[in-house]
Amino acid sequence: AGLVREVREEHTRQGLHAHLDLARIEREARSCFHRAHALRERFFTFVQCGIGGSALGNVAVHTALPGNRSVLVLDNLDPDSFPTFAQGLDRTFFHVVSKSGETLETLAQFLIVTEVLEGALGPRWREHIVVTTSRRDSALAQVCEQQGIEMLSLEPRLGGRFSYMSPVGLLSLAFAGRDPMALVRGARAAAERCLSERSPALAYALLLQRMLEAGRRIAVFWPYSERLWGLALWWRQLLAESLGKRCDLEGNEVRLGPCPYPALGASDQHSVHQLFMEGPDDKWFTFVELAHYQRRVRVPERYGEHPSFARIGGRELGEIMRAELRGTRHALEQAGRPCAALRLGRLDEETVGALLMTLECVITFAGKLLHVDPYDQPGVEAGKRATRALLEREGEAVTEAQRILSALAPDPGWVFAAGAEPQPPAGAGGAEAESGQAAGRD
């Protein structure tokens, strides 16, 4: 109860825990609803450009709650899967999201999209794009101001992985024909429960802490619904970035954090369950059960003289899925593997809003229990700095790129190479030849 009061008071008196700002969420949900209503009169496809927290929440919710308009989430730079946008641009709207306004992947998406739009639509291309960011001094914001591109504001205190309940996610939800206000109602009800003395979020955070203390660092999140697979991927980021920390709040090196592992029922019963049952005893499991699937599919009653057919004939697929979940959980518990369960009635906006808010509150309480900052991610920055150095074309960064490529020279004792080696980034200078020679020896 004391921990719940502490979180509640920090939010109300100090403005901490920005994801709990329900007044802001409700205000932005209403604004997104009206904005999306106007967009739906002109556009049929909505493309979300972003990565990490700017994308995964959208993937989670649109997988769980498909709407009546097309929403595409671009969350990578893989050239083999990046769309060409060869047709349909007249009816396509783009939402580019970068909290910092400096995210390399999102800037690349922005450059590609704006060039395609300008080439295809001429002067009216700006009507097909909006940018959401929290920093008006960033490169992205400055270009938007120069080019007259509309910008939406993102609350600066809101971490990217906590940002779904903002224009980052609510605009695409409303465009898809779903009700953002219903999602907010679910989030509000969940926040009230999570900040009560019988908080389900605190109970789950305590379980997470106990599992870490017991040496169970791998947290398997196992929904038995393909519509919840996106949520499992979102939870992976939320858990890993929030709690995987080198130092505690006093700066002491602690190197703690759970390793999230998303699994999908019932498919992964036939891929990783053997490991879960008889492999290293370092895991714990959260099963996500759906009481009501959207569709009812009945298995025909045929060949009943065979027991294998008889036991499933006449049953619904949802009934079989629930039996598989419970059977798998029972087997794991009998093997001494700890299990928890999240039970959902049906997947609608209120349920999804409640689930997102509950899991976000779990992270808030877990940060308190583990004595780490759940809202930063300092470890991510090292990789970003190295990537920027590798892409620089001049100056001191080129020397840094050469150093990085030299450090990455493959060890012929263990590296397997097949086919042509990729070309090092332009500007790497002499490191290109050094890296290529090292690769050639393999």
Image (spheres, helix red, strand yellow):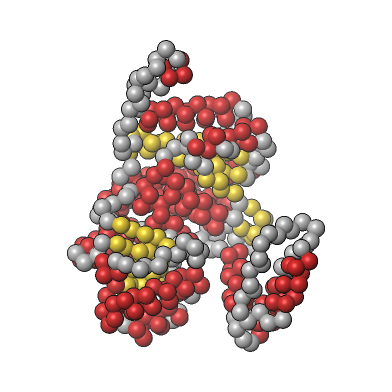
> Height in image: 114 above or below 243?
below
Q: Is residue 214 visible?
A: no
Image point 47% across, 73% down: which residue?
108
Q: Residue furthest front?
A: 419
Q: Is residue 403 above or below residue 327?
A: below
Q: Name the residue rendered at 64%, 60% in the picture.
A: 247
Instruction: Work out whether 287 lies above or below 88.
Output: above
Side of 3 where 119 appears, left or right = left
The outermost residue toward the right is 413
Rendered location of residue 368, percent (x, y): 53, 53
Give coordinates of residue 378: x percent, y percent: 58, 66
Quadrant location, the C terminus: bottom right
Q: Nearer the viewer, residue 294 or 90?
A: 90
Q: Position of residue 379 (x, y in %)?
A: 61, 64
Q: Position of residue 369 (x, y in %)?
A: 56, 50
Q: Residue at x 41, y 54 (%)?
A: 59
The reply to whether residue 377 is visible in this rendering is: yes
Could you say which quadrant of the image residue 126 lies in?
A: bottom left
Name the residue nearer the viewer: 134 or 401.
401
Q: Residue at the spot x=40%, y=67% of the render?
A: 84
Between 119 and 105, the residue placed more toward the observer is 119
Please tell me in which quadrant of the rendered image residue 318 appears.
top left
Q: For residue 89, which quarter of the picture?
A: bottom left
